[in-house]
Amino acid sequence: MNIAQHLSTHDIKPSYQRIKIYEYLYEKMNHPTVDLIYKNLVGEIPTLSKTTVYNTLKLFIDKGITSTVTIEDNEVRYDAIMDAHGHFKCTACGAIYDIKYDFKDVAMNELKGFEVKETQVHVKGKCNQCLTNKN
Amino acid sequence: MNIAQHLSTHDIKPSYQRIKIYEYLYEKMNHPTVDLIYKNLVGEIPTLSKTTVYNTLKLFIDKGITSTVTIEDNEVRYDAIMDAHGHFKCTACGAIYDIKYDFKDVAMNELKGFEVKETQVHVKGKCNQCLTNKN
DNA sequence: CATAAATTTGTAATCATTACAAATATAAAT
DNA sequence: ATTTATATTTGTAATGATTACAAATTTATG
Ligand SMILES: [Mn+2]
Ligand SMILES: [Mn+2]
Ligand SMILES: [Zn+2]
Ligand SMILES: [Zn+2]
């Protein structure tokens, strides 16, 4: 996928910083925090400012190509995948997995007459790998 | 329900402040923020400190009689209901509704081999009332 | 090339939360 | 009842993430 193109399509001028930040989000798929994005790009872009990372992510969210994931109440993470999906966070290794769910099953009968705009599903526990390694 | 009793059962000494804070949480059922709890109790307990509210909620969570609800990534709310349930937040009036969901439908096939500890479901949109009043 | 507009950057301000130590209240011991 | 120890509450300072803002830089336009 052509990132510059993707940004342009969504009314975002593809500056160098914006391309690099989106590229990181999209390719790593690791639901990073602002700090993680900054630390991973400042090597390649020595002048990068953390404010730019904040501004850029806010712009991405505004234009609808990025979403936030708040599993822990003290850290905001970002995600370039915009299709409805949930997240599993392993409390042992910290990894975050994408999980699919059937929207109908979640936003159910009790929300009759309500207009649903977005749904977030967050599951915590221990992942397959961590459970296996423990033995 | 006897609040002092409930606290004692969960290994929490029922001080005046603790009882009042739990009472507020339990009776209002409004998923308040720390600030809201503080503002609502400081009239009755003029010496109350916001630090005490923070400390007390942390203790409640630790002892398993309170949980956090993080729908917006910039405000933490608290809930005395410990049964698994989700939340709907109306983006128009700000009200938060409890919603039931079938756990099996949410933590599904993709989590085979994973150990699920807790699940949070957050839905945003417009509530019945706000949709009706708009007309 | 000159000028305007957009983007990035660095620093200061803000706000929620936590750390910490003093003050107060409760319980235990004499 | 008085002293002593323990638990709880309180106020203030520190921390850390995010935002505000203005200067500096880059990109677009005439
Ligand atoms: Mn994701
Ligand atoms: Mn609830
Ligand atoms: Zn793991
Ligand atoms: Zn509403």
Image (cartoon, coloured by chain):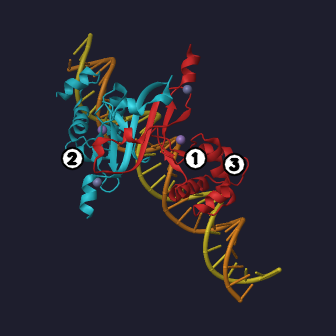
Chain colours: A cyan, B red, C orange, D yellow
Q: Earlier in the sequence, mark 3 or mark 1?
A: 1
Q: Neighbour class for label 2 at 10 Å: few (<14), some, many (≥20)?
A: few
Dot 3 falls on a residue whose secondary structure is loop
Q: Quadrant of residue C9?
A: top left
Task: Compute the Cα span from label 2 to label 1.
Answer: 40 Å
User: Please, what is the three-letter code of the amino acid marked with disc 3?
Assistant: Val
Q: Chain of mark 3?
A: B
Could you tell me which secondary element the residue under label 1 belongs to?
Answer: helix
Q: Are marks 3 and 1 on the same chain?
A: yes
Which residue does the numbered mark 3 point to in the structure image? Answer: B42
> What kind of residue is marked 1?
Val
Q: Quadrant of the N terminus of chain A?
A: top left
> In the rendering, at what x and y percent does residue B26 appear?
62, 46
Residue at mark 2 shares a chain with residue at mark 3? no
- Image depth: mark 2 or mark 1 in front: 1
Which residue is denoted by mark 2 in the rendering? A43
Q: Position of residue A125 (x, y in %)?
A: 36, 52
Q: Distance from label 3 to label 1 (Cα)?
A: 12 Å
Q: Quadrant of residue A9?
A: top left
Name the quarter where the C terminus of chain A is drawn. bottom left
Q: Nearer the viewer, mark 2 or mark 3?
A: 3
- What residue is drawn where x is 21% and y is 46%? A43
Give the total number of marks visible in the rendering.
3
Report the residue that reaches farthest toward the left.
Answer: A1
Callout 2 amino acid: Gly
Q: Dot 3, crowdedness within 10 Å: few (<14), some or many (≥20)?
A: few
